[in-house]
Amino acid sequence: MTNQDLPEKREVLPLFDIFKVDTKEAHILTGIDDVRHAARAVRDLGPGTVILTHRGGVCVFDGKEYYESPFTGFTIEGRTGRGDTAPPPF
């Protein structure tokens, strides 16, 4: 993996229906730091929908609307999924 622009981005990115980047990757592709402006600029390179994750959450841009949600904490209740149950015997 390298942190450099993709020279073929205008040929490659239109092949994606959905393209996910984080803020650093979006900045490398566009030179833009603002989340919404970067999501729009990446979308303008060709993908149908852009999912851009950032420190505070996620921004999705489909060419018409922005959909945003913050990252929030969650708890796991009960025993399932916490590694404290034994697997079935073989």
Image (spheres, helix red, strand yellow):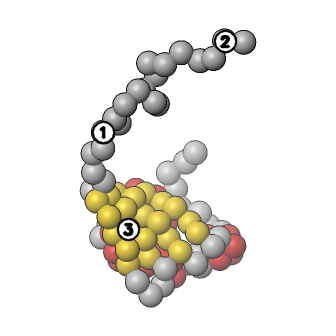
Dot 2 and dot 3 residues touching (CB under 8 Å)? no
Q: Which of the two discs, 1 and 3, sits closer to the camera?
A: 1
**At x 55% / y 48%, what residue is drawn?**
2
Is 30 rendered above or below residue 28? below
**At x 32% / y 64%, what residue is drawn?**
69
- The CA distance from mark 1 to mark 3 is 23 Å
Q: Which of the two discs, 2 and 3, sits closer to the camera?
A: 2
Q: Which numbered marker is on residue 89?
A: 2
Residue under label 3, please give it.
59
**At x 58% / y 45%, what residue is drawn?**
1
Instruction: Point out the tag, 2 or 1, that comes first from the N-terminus.
Output: 1
In the rendered image, residue 38, in percent from the top left (x then y), is placed at 39, 72
> Hey, what amino acid is under mark 2?
Pro
Q: In front: 87, or 53?
A: 87
> Hey, what amino acid is under mark 3?
Cys
| Residue 8 appears left or right of 70 | right
Residue under label 1, please give it.
75
The residue carrying pointer 1 sits among few (fewer than 14), some (14 to 19) or many (20 or more) residues within 10 Å by Cα, namely few
In the rendered image, residue 85, in percent from the top left (x then y), is placed at 49, 19
Q: Secondary structure at mark 2?
A: loop
Report which quarter residue 6 is drawn in: bottom right
> Hey, what amino acid is under mark 1?
Thr
Tell how many labels: 3
Q: In front: 56, or 67?
A: 67
Q: Secondary structure at mark 3?
A: strand
In the image, farthest residue toward the right: 90
Is 30 rendered above or below residue 3? below
In the image, farthest residue toward the top: 89
- The CA distance from mark 2 to mark 3 is 44 Å
